[in-house]
Image (spheres, rainbow, N blue to C red):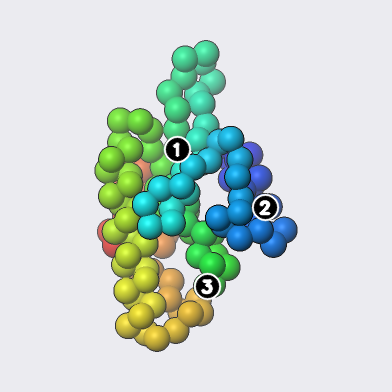
Amino acid sequence: MTAHLETYFQSLQSGCKPLQVSHGFMHTETHGAVALDARGLKPKGAQTRLYVYPDVETETLWLITIGDKVSQRDDNSTCREWIVGLREARQQRGATDDSTTPSNAHDGEKNNEKSDPP
């Protein structure tokens, strides 16, 4: 999983725009989120997904949540709420700098702790 995150991050750092980046382990989700896939260690290991949001305005790669096929619907909902909340907070502040960091940016752990929208 971390290797896929590193590869995606390096693609962005090289100057590629998020919509230009394409790897076999990634796919786009709602509201601009990207899911990075990883298979488990066993031959039929469960696939895990790390959901990230490449924020073009602040050049920040937000790590939103991590899940599997079972939690995919909830994970997509979490991403949508989080990204919409980030955008709304930014509009309210009228800024595009790091001061728009959502209050839940440090949350996001999967252990039954869903991130609340900012």
Q: Position of residue 100 (x, y in %)?
A: 43, 76
Pointer 3: what residue? 57
- Mark 3 or mark 1: whose residue is earlier in sequence: 1
- Mark 2 or mark 3: whose residue is earlier in sequence: 2
Instruction: Classify residue 34 as left or right of residue 20.
Output: left
Vertical position of residue 88 compared to residue 50: above or below: below
Disc number lying in front (2 or 1): 2
Mark 2 and 1 residues: CB-CB less than 8 Å, in contact? no
Vertical position of residue 22 compared to residue 55: above or below: above
Q: Position of residue 29 (x, y in %)?
A: 40, 48
Pointer 2: what residue? 11
Amino acid type, residue under disc 3 in the picture: Glu
Pointer 1: what residue? 49
- Residue, x 37% and y 68% (percent of image)? 86
Can I make out residue 112 in this image?
Answer: no
Q: Give residue 102's quadrant in the image.
A: bottom left
